[in-house]
Amino acid sequence: MIWNEEFECMPLDELKKVQSNYLEKLVDYVYANNEVYRARLDQVGIKPGSITDISQIVKLPFTTKMDMRDYYPYGLFSAKREDIREIHVSSGTTGNPTLVGYTKEDIQLWSTVMARTLCCAGAEPGDIIQIAYGYGLFTGGLGFHYGALEAGLTILPMSSGQTKRQLKIMQDFKPRILGCTPSYALYMADEARELGIDPRDSSWEIGIFGAEPWSDSMRNEIEDTWDIMATDVYGLSEIIGPGVSQECTYKDGLHIFSDVFYPEIIDPDTGEQVAEGEDGELVITTLTKQGIPLLRYRTRDIVSMTNEKCRCGRTSPRVSKIKGRTDDMIVVRGINVFPSQIEHVLLGIEGTCPHYQIVIDRAAHKLDQVEIMVEVDQQLFSDEIKKLNEMSARIKKEIEGVLSIGVKVKLVEPKTIERSMGKSQRVIDKRNL
Amino acid sequence: MRISQISVFLENRQGRLYDACSLLGEKGINIRALTIAETESFGVLRIVVDKTDDALELLRYNGFTANITEVVAVEVSDKPGGLAELLKLLSDNDINVEYMYGFVEKSTDKALLVFRFENTDAAQDVLVKNNIRIANNQDIQGL
């Protein structure tokens, strides 16, 4: 079903009117309530009332991830702190984490877009959904939870991990829908086989997979393994969490809920919008958010977008799967990892030099593995294995503390990490994304 | 009274031990004693050579991570129980051995063993007090 036919199937000219109306109110709202935006709008000569049409959005300043960190925690909030009802935090890089706050109305918005997301994937009210995204500060679990409540689904709030239990609950309650990361879906299949369960006999018919990049070949593998329809969900905590865009059952691009999250595709170097269908950086303006509304937020995800009406009947533009990043961020098991985080840790440990390489692999058991190769220089080196192992364990512990995921640390000889053009190649991604 | 050991970091990769040893051989540096400690992913080569300074420079110049470690070369009677006797003495005096290994060559009827102690000073005191002969750098070079 289509959860909100009025907006999801609205003719584009009418949609523009809705967007224009929202944008005008948004500019007035942030101007009145947020100092950072007021100063930036003043700088480009924009006053309340001067934006009346969505096409004028190009006059507005961009917001970046760096802004989120610089104004941590509350600098970009437009709502009063006491009106914030929920806070989510995503792991930060070297500095501050990214914090987002939701007012009661924002939670309602999130519920609505996630209800749309679930229905877009093929859910029907009354279906049972197994939510195996992490609950907590991460937006995945609760985002799905709110959407499922709104859409009238029966929720199994599993959170991530505890695979045996996930499988037992699946067998006992026969949920039709599964939400988790794509790599976890494959991991669970291995575990199922070990327990003598044929994954193709599972009750799941629809999978809503996201929080990490995955390819069409991985989709085929998941669909074959579980005998399931695997759909892609996209979101980022800065915008709302999951619920920004979702594939419909035709799996031909992700429908972005553009009446509330206005998308632009820009050339990351010039900042200019690119022609429809061309690759560029996805920029999103949250047209109706209250807690922490963002003007032209640069996602750093490279995608393309089409406005062509979809066979499912929705007019909302369709965004491609992520084709790349404008920065060096990598996503591992749903966690954002920046090489600079690892560099920062190494610089903080006496005796290590910031010569490292991150190797990411999706091994036979399907969960992404991170191996950090650290060059051993004269300072770090000891003739005692015990001390080298201690150093390696310390590096591992500190990196895990910053990244919140398990890593392997391997000590390597100096200069074994390839340097290209004088700079080492920091990340080797062996996953077939 | 101590001798200098060169410790070299080696990744567990084919040919790395060969690389290090052939480098020394080409420059006429003789290895007197050698041991390798290994873990799953890396190893540490420990060697005593005749020309320590040259060897260290050579290894570092060729990209190896190498350090000097002060160790003690101790003469032990080359007879059954000879080592046990020495270890008992060390143990009775609370001296911890980090690792040890033997020399390739022998001087007379004594075996020469390299010891890396947790506390080298304390170990040396005990050895000297008990009239255990300790080899110095000249002894090693003269082997």
Image: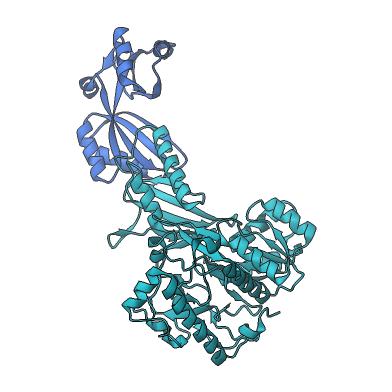
Chain colours: A cyan, B blue
| Image quarter of residue A265 | bottom left
| Image quarter of residue A281 | bottom left
How many numbered marks, from 0 up?
0
**Residue B64, x across and y down, in percent:** 29, 43
| Closer to the camera in the image, A50 or B137 | A50
- In the image, residue A266 above or below residue A234: below
Specify whether residue A217 is in view. no
Point 50% across, 59% down: residue: A90
**Residue A369, x across and y down, in percent:** 52, 54
Report the side of A204 relative to A317 (left or right): right
- In the image, residue A373 above or below residue A224: above
Q: Residue furthest top?
A: B130
**Residue A360, x across and y down, in percent:** 48, 57
| Closer to the camera in the image, B69 or B19 | B69
Report the side of A109 relative to A164 (left or right): left
- In the image, residue B56 above or below residue A331: above
Point 60% across, 74% down: residue: A246
**Residue B31, x across and y down, in percent:** 29, 31
In what quadrant of the picture does the N terminus of chain A appear? bottom right
- In the image, residue A386 above or below residue A279: above
Specify whether residue A343 is in view. yes
Point 51% across, 51% down: residue: A405
| Image quarter of residue A283 | bottom left
Point 24% across, 22% down: residue: B140
